[in-house]
Amino acid sequence: MENPVVFLAFANDNDNHLPLLDEERRVISDHLLPLANNNFIQLFVEPTAQITDLTKYITDFKNRVIVFHYGGHASSSRIFLTDQEADAQGVALLLGQQENLKLVFLNGCSTLEQVDLLFSHGIPAVIATSVPVEDPSAREFADKFYAALGRDHSIEEAFNLAAANHQMRGKDLPVIHRGLQLNNSQEESMPWGLYVSEEHADVLQWKIPKKMASSFIVRGAQMSYSNRGSINEKLIETIANTIESYSQKVQGLVAEARRRRRKPKMRDLRAAVIDSFPTPLATHLRKLLLSEEISTMRLRKIVNVYSVSVRMLSYVLLAQLWDELHRDPDFHIPPDQRSLIDEFFHLSAESALDFDYVKLIRAIGDSLEANDKEPFVKEFLQLRKEFYENKAFEEAYLFLEEMREELRSSIDADEIESFCVQAEDQLCEIFTHIGFSANYTMVAVKNIELEKRRHYDPEFRHNIVILDRITASFGILDEALITNGFVENECVVLLSNEEELSPYLNLSPFIIDENALSGQHNSKIFFLEYFVGNAIHYQLTDNLKDRLVVNDNQYPSVYDQMEEYKKLIFK
């Protein structure tokens, strides 16, 4: 995996020299160098750009350029490079070949008319000028914009910060446009504008990715299952060893095997491992452990088990964070952690593909620690420590995040088995740290009925589905649990003891059961995925393909919960 590229191109004119252009190049580079030094991006600067330079490097950086910045003289139909004028149509066609390009910043005079050309070639966002701009203003605006973009602000936030700085100096306010609908007064007065194509509106929330580009995947390693026993054997045994203290079924199999002086039967151990975890995770473990085909699909199943695991754990922490914010008005989320939590609540369909849930787990764990709050899942205390201290754990997480991205493109057939072996080893490492998930039970609560007999205290009948033991699941799975206390209706809760409803943690609206909401038997569990306008998009945990949209018309109780949570988070 190679670094994404931020491409800075500058061109000055000896006859009409821009004295601050070199300074513009230096200040932008200074803001982006920390990202390059941390191996998040490759910063490429061409101080005397020519047409041959642009063509050569855009070709060399195939699909790696994420931001293209031009500083120099320009007009409505061309940019003025060092050797000659470059026609705007050719520039747009060239940049349109970069499939991952998010932003083009044309920091020259009167470049507004080039925006439509760039849109027509698929560029999502363009910063351009509708009027001639002075050299000092151009340098200042670029300085403030890249200072913010380099410090984890989105395109929209960075533009607004630069715009605010510009307006505070008594200048006209730059604004954001969807499409190119301008009136004459705007064209005459506005300096910069941020223009976003209507089909790529979510690019406003895009940030420069902070992922190390150094690869944790070993290519050409030629690792094979032939010298390590049967496929899945190591993974089953590793998980069984990790969860033995939590799982009576695994304990029984191990004890029986010791009595008989043999290893536990692998098929029995496999079933016990699968049934020990909550259904969202167990479903994907089952798909992985029941298949021994060496293929890209197996690699995808390994990554799915990892992804579902960390998402489930992050939703547990998000659910507790809501409770803590509700109970304690003085609960304070530190700034660094808040930015990561805010990023989650602004996930789009595009950004959800890359979102790092491990960082979210860390952020919420750090927030609980900062406020002296003990996690509902006690094992999170040790997990948080291991996040920061265990190198093998960190490398396993980074490997699987990289493999998640790798699977978006085709994988060389000669690498598939080696990648599968490596990925299985890293998943083993992950489970040695998160095996405690088997110590908790996930339950879908359908509805609650009050039962009151004469001379007896009232009791509450919870109609539930216990979300585990999927290898034995068939027919109608609804059960009833009668208790003295009660939880919330139509929700998914986490219990430390499936026979007791206290203590519990309500995981809705992050994990929801559509069948509970619609009054149907069994359960249909969805994970929150991303937000679009006033709608919340959920993903079916069973296949990670089917979607459910929640809004104020469809399942409004879930929508209202999310709105209440956001009010607390963003107060």
Image (cartoon, grey):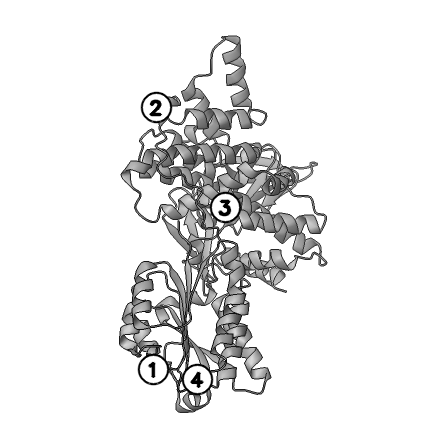
The answer to which of marks 3 and 4 sits earlier in the sequence is 4
**Mark pair 3, 4: CA separation:** 54 Å
Q: Tag 3: residue type?
A: Arg
**Mark pair 1, 2: CA separation:** 62 Å
Q: From the viewer's perspective, is the residue at label 4 or at label 2 nearer?
A: 4
The residue that label 2 is drawn on is 226
Residue 52: x and y, percent?
29, 69
The answer to which of marks 4 and 1 sits earlier in the sequence is 4
The residue carrying pointer 2 sits among few (fewer than 14), some (14 to 19) or many (20 or more) residues within 10 Å by Cα, namely: few
Identify the mark at residue 504; answer none if there is no mark: none
Identify the mark at residue 311; answer none if there is no mark: 3
**Mark pair 3, 2: CA separation:** 33 Å
Q: Are marks 3 and 4 in contact (CB under 8 Å)?
A: no
Q: Nearer the viewer, residue 385 or 252?
A: 385
Looking at the image, how many numbered discs can be counted on the residues? 4
Up the image or down, 480 lies above or below 335; here it is above
**Left or right of residue 394, residue 287 in this image:** left
Q: Which element type, helix, strand or loop, lies under badge 1?
A: helix
**Residue 557 seen in the figure:** no
Residue 47: x and y, percent?
42, 71
Q: Quadrant of residue 293?
A: top left
Residue drawn 69% across the image and 57% down it: 332
Q: Which element type, helix, strand or loop, lies under badge 3?
A: helix
Residue drawn 70% across the image and 36% down it: 455
The answer to which of marks 1 and 3 sits earlier in the sequence is 1
**Left or right of residue 295, residue 536 in this image:** right
Identify the mark at residue 113; answer none if there is no mark: 1
Q: Are marks 1 and 3 in contact (CB under 8 Å)?
A: no
The answer to which of marks 4 and 2 sits earlier in the sequence is 4
Identify the mark at residue 17; answer none if there is no mark: 4
Q: Tag 4: residue type?
A: His
Q: Are marks 1 and 2 in contact (CB under 8 Å)?
A: no
